[in-house]
Amino acid sequence: MERLTLQQISDIYSGKITNWREVGGENRPIVLLSRETNSGTHVYFLEEVIRLGQADDTTLFSPDTLLLPSSEGISAEVRQNPNAIGYDGLGYVTPDMKTVDVGLSFEGPFWSPTVETVNAGQYPIARELYMYSTAAASDAITTYLEWILSPEAQRIVLDLGFIPVAATE
């Protein structure tokens, strides 16, 4: 598979599509991989991909979904099982893993998961993460939060394969 629509991914993970042939692939059963239910990644994927952002939708993951405790577990299983599909943070994608371009419709466009497409707001499966502190944060916490936003820290984030904080005006 080179590309899938968000709706196809929703249908795969909800169990409506169970064979790769149904989305243009080989006649093989799809093996679904997900993070465990206590993972923020799992919750995001359920709400924004499976339910397509519809708050009143009650669709759930297919009961055939294998729940794994870590991103590393998903990556390892995807590498060894040609029938598997999994989702993970961009920082866990390695050169030996195949990614799938994602589009909002069959007409496209379809976007690869890259730092550039995420920062441009094009890649449809991306979420922002936030850090919070109290207004009366200690000096150590304030120093840490300031450092996190520094160019040095953002280079480290990028070097690890994650998305740095986009520059704001």
Image (cartoon, rainbow, N blue to C red):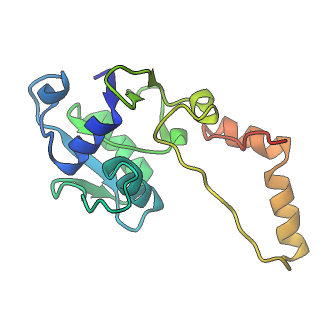
Say whether residue 85 is left or right of residue 31: right
Residue 1 place in picture, x, y as percent = 28, 23
Q: Is residue 53 left or right of residue 15?
A: right
| Of 107 and 148, the residue lying toward us | 107
Q: Is residue 91 above or below residue 1?
A: below
x and y percentages locating residue 134 in the rendered image: 78, 77
Q: Residue at x 17, y 38 (%)?
A: 30
Residue 133 in which image quadrant? bottom right
Residue at the image position 14 percent from the left and 44 percent from the top = 16
For image coordinates 47% across by 25% down, the residue present is 111
In the image, residue 25 lies at what x, y percent?
Answer: 18, 22
Residue drawn where x is 33% and y is 34% of the image = 79
Residue 77, image quadrant: top left
- Foreground residue among 56 and 67: 56
- Quadrant of the rendered structure where residue 145 is? bottom right
- Quarter occupied by the C terminus: top right
- 75 over 68 or under it: above or below: above
